[in-house]
Image: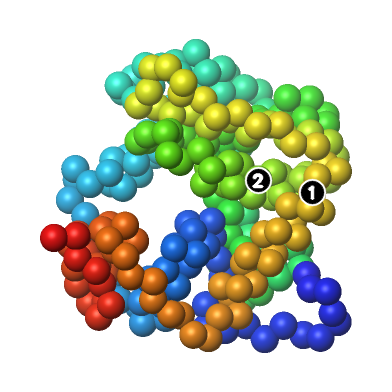
Amino acid sequence: MTDTDEPVILGPVKQWSYSRLKNFEKCPHMVYLAAVKKEKRPEWDDDHPAMRGIRVHNHLEAYVKGETDEIIKEMKFFQEELDDLREAYTEGKVSVEGDWGFDINWASTGWWDDDVWARIKLDAMKQLDETTARVIDYKTGKKFGNEVSHTGQAQLYMIAGFLKYPDLNMIETDFYYLDQKSGNRLKKTYTRNKLPLYMKKFTERAMKLTTCENFRPKPSKMNCKYCDFGPDNGSGVCPYGATCE
């Protein structure tokens, strides 16, 4: 979706997700190393936060689908909500782990199709009525300091939901911070009339990534500290990495 009829010439990174977009805006060279150079990141052990997050997400998906009855500690603050999703799933009102692909014009396409441009993955979506749905996202880790980033993620879920379901007029987003007892929700509500505004904003941001040719580095102690390719907690292959020592 562009302001002119001229065809868009994409760069070497032709697809984006929210996490890739965040990494690009933090340090374009990080995306270059991962998506263009195909550099390998260090292997994560079972205690790595990312591995834990994957395990928890997989378990909650299985629980909602009725494939397991096991209650894990990450469910303790949201047992009622998860049981509600589980029951609604049996009624056909909940979908889980949606892998939604869109082309450059925001038309639906397959996750692995040649024309896929945006990839958006949802944890769960509940149909509340004919015109309203709720998107649920499970979060391990802290809420504080991530509110702006997670609000952006919610806006992307809103775009995807309205595009996939044209009968919806309202979408609620609800993030469950599984590790927190209090202040453990981030809830937003969006109406369809906001869709063009947010689509325009995300299109502009994503086009900078998918048309980029010069992935310049932005080294800093903060950017490089947890970079997969940085000198401290990464593979060290990035020649621009700033050490925190």
CA gap, disc 1 to disc 2? 9 Å
Residue shown at the point (19%, 72%) measured from the top left: 236
* Residue topped by disc 2: 155
Q: Is residue 130 left or right of residue 135?
A: right
Quadrant (top left, top right, bottom left, bottom right) of the C terminus: bottom left
101 vs 104: above or below: above
Q: Residues within 10 Å of mark 1 (few under 14, many from 20)?
A: some
Quadrant (top left, top right, bottom left, bottom right) of the N terminus: bottom right
Q: Please give the label number shown on residue 195.
A: 1
Residue shown at the point (26%, 72%) measured from the top left: 241
Residue located farthest toward the top when viewing the structure as drawn: 80
Dot 2: element: helix
Q: Amino acid at mark 1?
A: Leu
Q: Nearer the viewer, residue 70 or 2?
A: 2
Q: Do the numbered discs 1 and 2 sit on residues whose CB atoms are within 8 Å?
A: no
| Residue 77, percent from left and from top | 41, 17
Q: Is residue 165 left or right of residue 139?
A: right
Dot 1: element: helix
Q: Is residue 158 left or right of residue 89?
A: right
Q: Is residue 54 visible?
A: yes
| Residue 22, percent from left and from top | 49, 59
Q: Amino acid at mark 2?
A: Gln
